[in-house]
């Protein structure tokens, strides 16, 4: 089985911790992935930069050859569409990196107040103070019982007293007002279709209306 390419690894583990990468991949591959990660962030921060500026930046930072710089550029460009779907993961990673750098610098200076604020921000952002969400016990969910009713009070509507009597009174009232209306039975239309719409046959024997 062939080893995954640097591009494949970047697509799945671009923001994986360096220590974990070193446990899973060869040192040369890890070095490349970390370099791609750094330049990926630089590319996002400098969206107007040209290919030449990108190559010059990576050559100056990492001392790589021009061919390697442009190969890294190709990988970075292929990863950019991931930003639309993984932007939240990217910004979460960036925030954690910033907080950790702040914490380490504060620890080196013995600045316990800044250390405490950084640790608090890290815990709050990563929600480490909350318990893991539990799966919903669907087998224990009771189906809500529903019963049909004509009582409008269940909707907060005050019922009309003697509603059935009121309905009967209205029916009698409107029936009396429409006493002149007569029901007429359906009758077939007495039309001479043969005279009104005569048919003729064409050469193929098909019937059609005369024009």
Image: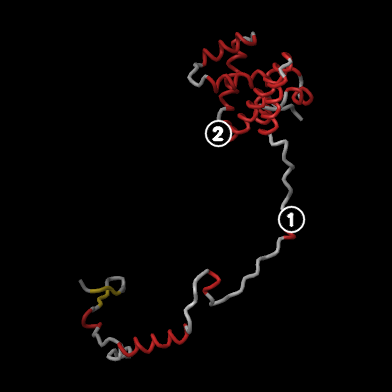
In this view, the residue in front, 203 or 184, is 184
SS under mark 1: loop
Say which quadrant the C terminus sits in: bottom left
Q: In the figure, 206 relative to 193: above or below?
A: above
Cα gap from disc 2 to disc 1, whole angstroms: 34 Å
Q: Residue at x 77, y 30 (%)?
A: 1
In this view, the residue in front, 76 or 107, is 107
> Does 169 sit left or right of 69 as displayed?
left
Q: Mark 2 or mark 1: which comes first in sequence?
A: 2
Q: Position of residue 167 (x, y in %)?
A: 43, 84
Q: Residues within 10 Å of mark 2 (few under 14, many from 20)?
A: few
From the image, tell me which residue sits under label 1: 137
In this view, the residue in front, 64 or 129, is 129
Q: Position of residue 22 (x, y in %)?
A: 77, 22
Q: Residue furthest right?
A: 23
In this view, the residue in front, 88 or 134, is 134
Q: In the figure, 140 relative to 146: above or below?
A: above
Q: Residues within 10 Å of mark 1 (few under 14, many from 20)?
A: few
Q: Residue at x 23, y 85 (%)?
A: 192
Q: Nearer the viewer, mark 2 or mark 1?
A: 1
Q: Position of residue 129 (x, y in %)?
A: 72, 37
From the image, tell me which residue sits under label 2: 84
Indicate the quadrant where residue 44 lies.
top right
Indicate the quadrant where residue 25 lies.
top right
């Amino acid at each position: 089985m062939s080893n995954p390419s640097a591009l494949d690894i970047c697509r799945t583990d671009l923001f994986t911790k360096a220590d974990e990468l070193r446990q899973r991949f060869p040192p040369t591959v890890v070095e490349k992935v970390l370099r791609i990660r750094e330049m990926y962030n630089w590319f996002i921060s400098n969206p107007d930069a040209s290919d030449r500026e990108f190559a010059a930046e990576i050559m100056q930072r990492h001392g790589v050859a021009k061919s390697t710089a442009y190969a890294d550029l190709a990988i970075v460009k292929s990863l950019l569409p991931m930003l639309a779907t993984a932007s939240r993961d990217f910004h979460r990673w960036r925030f954690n990196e910033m907080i950790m750098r702040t914490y380490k610098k504060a620890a080196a200076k013995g600045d316990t107040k800044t250390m405490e604020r950084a640790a608090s921000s890290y815990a709050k952002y990563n929600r480490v103070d909350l318990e893991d969400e539990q799966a919903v016990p669907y087998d224990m969910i009771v189906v809500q019982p529903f019963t049909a009713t004509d009582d409008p009070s269940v909707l907060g509507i005050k019922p009309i007293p003697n509603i059935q009597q009121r309905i009967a009174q209205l029916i009698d009232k409107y029936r009396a007002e429409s006493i002149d209306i007569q029901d007429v039975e359906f009758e077939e239309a007495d039309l001479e279709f043969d005279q009104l719409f005569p048919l003729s046959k064409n050469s193929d024997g098909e019937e059609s209306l005369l024009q």
